[in-house]
Amino acid sequence: MRILFLGAPGAGKGTQCKKLASKYSLAHLSSGDILRDAVKNGTQAGLAAKEFMDKGMLVPDNVLIDLFREKLAQPACSKGFILDGFPRNLAQAESLDGLLSELKANLDKVIDLKTADDLLEERITGRRVCPNKACNAVYHIKFSKPKQDGVCDLCGTELSHRSDDKPELVKQRLSVYHELTSPLIEFYRGKQLLATVNGEGEQEQIFADILATLN
Ligand code: AMP
């Protein structure tokens, strides 16, 4: 199964992709996680990406395309994958088409998680993440609290607040989404791959709706 998720920052793509990846043993390729790792490890891609991420802007297309060309060719993706956060504009979507046809691996479904902007802002600014790379669990100070304040339930690491999840950058990231990423909805509708899922409500219900579109 090869699935692509669309949706604004804070729509809950990461959470749903993790559940889906674990249910069907698929590789989960999150562009944000891959870039944050690259920044942490000081790789060339990370050095190129950091200044754009710090401003809530899109990292140049060639950085993402090179990273995903390498990831998609890895054996971990041969049994199927979920793309989360890539592509983020039309040029990336067209490059992805090229990469996938080289690999003879067409997408089966594109899921657009739809959520109203005011809810997105609250979800993003209240988000807390586990910085332990092996865990990467995500919490929310109101909607999905850890058992102990500020500590990851799964691995005990102190939770952190992503610097681009602070209120001053959230509006910028949402406007980038509306201007550059949301046209992909029509792009994939035109290819008859699109399914829209309501991203508001309980996580379990959203997951059930996603499964229903895949079956
Ligand atoms: P995310 O965790 O998906 O919200 O991504 C965090 C940041 O990484 C974004 O605000 C962008 O700066 C960068 N980023 C993630 N995916 C992409 C992409 N496909 N194209 C360009 N920049 C990206």
Image: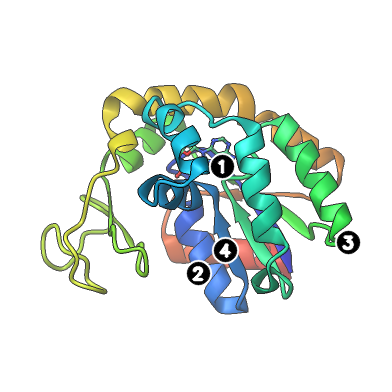
Cβ atoms at labels 4 and 1 below 8 Å apart: no
Tell me if the residue at label 3 has its CB under 8 Å from ligand 1: no
Tell me if I can see residue 44 in this picture.
Answer: yes
N-term-proximal mark, 4 vs 3:
4
Q: Which mark is residue 51?
A: none
Q: Earlier in the sequence, mark 2 or mark 4?
A: 2
Residue type at mark 3: give it.
Lys
Name which of mark 1 and mark 3 comes first in the sequence: 1
User: Seen in the image, is 2 located left or right of residue 177?
Assistant: right
Label 1, secondary structure: give it.
Answer: loop
Against 18, is 163 above or below? above
Residue displayed at 45% across by 59% down: 15
The verdict on label 4 being within 8 Å of ligand 1 is: no
Mark 1 burial class by Cα count in 10 Å: few <14, some 14-19, many 20+ = many
Spatial CA distance of label 2 from label 3 is 26 Å
Q: Amino acid at mark 4?
A: His
> Which residue is tagged 2?
19
* Left or right, 110 with reference to 208: right
Which type of secondary structure does the marked residue at label 3 adopt? Answer: loop
- Is residue 111 visible from the viewing direction of this image? no
Q: Amino acid at mark 1?
A: Gly
Closer to the camera, 20 or 106? 106
| Label 4 residue SS | strand
Front in this rendered view, residue 132 or 89: 132
Left or right: residue 163 compared with residue 205: left
The C terminus lies in quadrant: bottom right
As measured in the structure, the alpha-carbon distance from the residue carrying label 4 to the one carrying label 1 is: 16 Å
Label 1, label 3: how far apart the Cα atoms are: 26 Å
Residue 117 placement, left or right of 135: right
- Name the residue beneath numbered marker 4: 28
Q: Which residue is mark 1?
A: 7
